[in-house]
Image: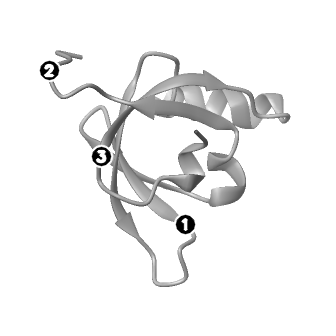
């Protein structure tokens, strides 16, 4: 599932980051959006874009245009990550 499609505050695990812009790809990974990283949706703006995510203890807002290149899967409840 694309991170941009996340609508509730579930925790998800990033499985792939494949942004076509190499600089933005590196920026997303530097911010904590890397395979294996845990992300949680915490806030959606009134127009649904951007969305704010908790990543490594920090809240980061990114546009849906960039979030669509981040693939995630739902985190299991008993997963210790």
Q: Upstream in the sequence, badge 3 or badge 2?
A: 3
Q: CA distance from mark 2 to mark 1?
A: 29 Å
Q: Can you identify the residue that label 2 sits on?
A: 78
Q: In the rendered image, which quarter is residue 7 located in? A: bottom left
Q: Residue furthest bottom?
A: 46
Which of label 3 and label 1 is nearer to you? 3
Give percent across and percent down for residue 2.
61, 42
Q: On residue 10, which mark appears?
A: 3
* Residue 70 drawn above or below residue 48: above
Q: Is residue 18 left or right of residue 20?
A: left
Give percent across and percent down for residue 50.
54, 66
* Residue 67 drawn above or below residue 80: below
Q: Quadrant of the C terminus?
A: top left
Q: Is residue 42 left or right of residue 67?
A: left
| Residue that appears at 46% across and 84% down | 46
Give percent across and percent down for residue 73.
46, 30
| Residue that appears at 40% across and 22% down | 37
Q: Upstream in the sequence, badge 2 or badge 1?
A: 1
Q: In the rendered image, which quarter is residue 79 located in? A: top left
Disc 3, SS: loop
Q: Are marks 3 and 1 in contact (CB under 8 Å)?
A: no
Q: Dot 2, how many residues are within 10 Å of its Cα: few (below 14), some (14-19), or many (20+)?
A: few
| Residue that appears at 30% across and 31% down | 56
Disc 1, SS: loop
Q: On residue 30, which mark appears?
A: none
């Amino acid at each position: 599932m694309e991170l941009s499609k996340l609508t509730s505050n579930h925790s998800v695990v990033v499985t792939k980051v494949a942004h076509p812009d190499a600089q933005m790809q590196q920026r997303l990974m530097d911010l904590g959006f890397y395979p294996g990283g845990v992300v949680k949706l915490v806030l959606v703006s009134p127009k649904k874009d951007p969305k704010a995510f908790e990543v490594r203890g920090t809240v980061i807002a990114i546009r849906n245009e960039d979030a669509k290149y981040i693939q995630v899967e739902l985190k299991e409840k008993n997963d210790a990550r």
